Every structure is written in structure tokens, then in C-alpha cells.
Image: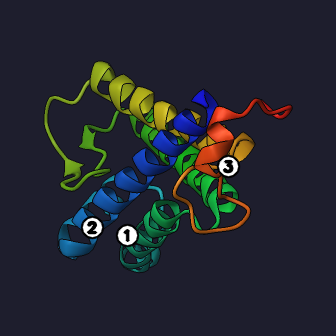
Amino acid sequence: MWVGLVSTLARFGLAAVWLVSGWVKFSDPTQTVVAVRAYHILPTDWVRPFAAVFPVLELVLGLVLLVGSATRPAALLSALGLVALVAAIASAWARGLSIDCGCFGGGGVVEGVDGRDYAIEIARDVGFLAMSMWLIVRPRTWFALGPGSRMSLSAATQPSMAE
């Protein structure tokens, strides 16, 4: 029972993360460009296209997780995205940039960002990464629409060899 509960909470939690993050960026494309540019990672010509596409991908990922139509593939994409975000934040920290990550809106150059701020952002994203990893291993959840993602509520009360 507890595996189904943890998996379901992880799926809905990650869905909320990606939906909120994607919506905030999608609804303010100018600020998203500022946030992406502040990392100084992408070539200048790639900043605007990336800033336009990334929020849409976050929204799609969040919707797929919300409905549970392809939990394991969505969790894998979530994990890859989070590894990239952690690497980008760590890169900004290592290069001495003072930026807001822009993960949930805002973003760009700000004064007074220090190692503690970056460590908190990385720790948060590593927590989300742990949720993604859990779902890669345990993708079956309650209230999922996808047949490979669905766990029946009756299975929660029966012992399982897989748990």
C-alpha cells in the first residue's frame, strides 16, 4: 500500500512542479528570455527559441504526469531535465554569477545571491530528482490513465511480490 501511496504522491507532486514552473514561464515569455540569458550557457541565437520551447515542454510533462498516461517515460524526461537544471545552477554558482534561477518565474541577474541560495536551489531540485527516480523504478500509481502506469486501489490492500 505504501508504495502506491508514495508513487502517487510523487507523480502528483512532480506534475504540480512542472505545471506551475511551465505556466509561470509561459505566461511571461520576456522574463523567461531574461532568465535563460542570465546563465550564459546557450549561444545568443538559441536563447529565445529555448525560452519559448522549454515552458511548453514543462507543461506537457506536467500534464502527462497529472493524468498518468506514461509515468515511467515522463519520470525519465523529468529526471533528465532536473539533472540539466542542477548542472546549470551549479555552473552559475561555480562561475560566480549572481542570478535567480528562474525555475518558478522571475530569473535573471540579481544582487546578493550567494552559495547558500544556490545550495538551497540545488537541494530542492535534487529532491524533485529523487521523486523522478522513484517513479522510474515504481511507475504504477493510483488514478493513472495509462495501462502501464495504473495501479488498482484493490492492489493496495493485497501483498505483492514486487513490493
Colouring convention used in this rendered image of the protein: rainbow
Q: Are marks 1 and 3 in contact (CB under 8 Å)?
A: no
Residue at 72% in and 34% down: 158
Mark 3–mark 2 CB contact (< 8 Å): no
| Cα distance between the residues tagged 3 and 2 | 25 Å
Res. 116 image quadrant? top left
Could one spot residue 133 in this view of the protein? no
- Label 2: how many residues lie within 10 Å, few (<14), some (14-19) or many (20+)? some
In this rendered view, identify the residue nearer to me: 73 or 53.
Answer: 73
Residue 125 placement (x, y as % from top left): 45, 37
Disc 2 and disc 1 in contact, CB within 8 angstroms: yes
Q: Earlier in the sequence, mark 1 or mark 3?
A: 1
The quadrant of the image that shows the C terminus is: top right
Which residue shows up at 58% across the image and 47% down it? 153
Q: Residue furthest left?
A: 111
Which circle's residue, 2 or 1, is located before the other in the chain?
2
Residue that lies at the very extreme toward the top in this rendered image: 116
- Residue 55 shows which numbered tag? 1
Q: Which residue is mark 2?
A: 23
Percent coordinates x, y for residue 105 in the rendering: 22, 56
Mark 1 residue type:
Pro
Residue type indicated by callout 2? Trp
**Residue 139, which numbered label?**
3
Q: Nearer the viewer, residue 55 or 91?
A: 55
Q: CA distance from mark 2 to mark 1?
A: 7 Å
- Which sits earlier in the primary sequence, circle 3 or circle 2? 2
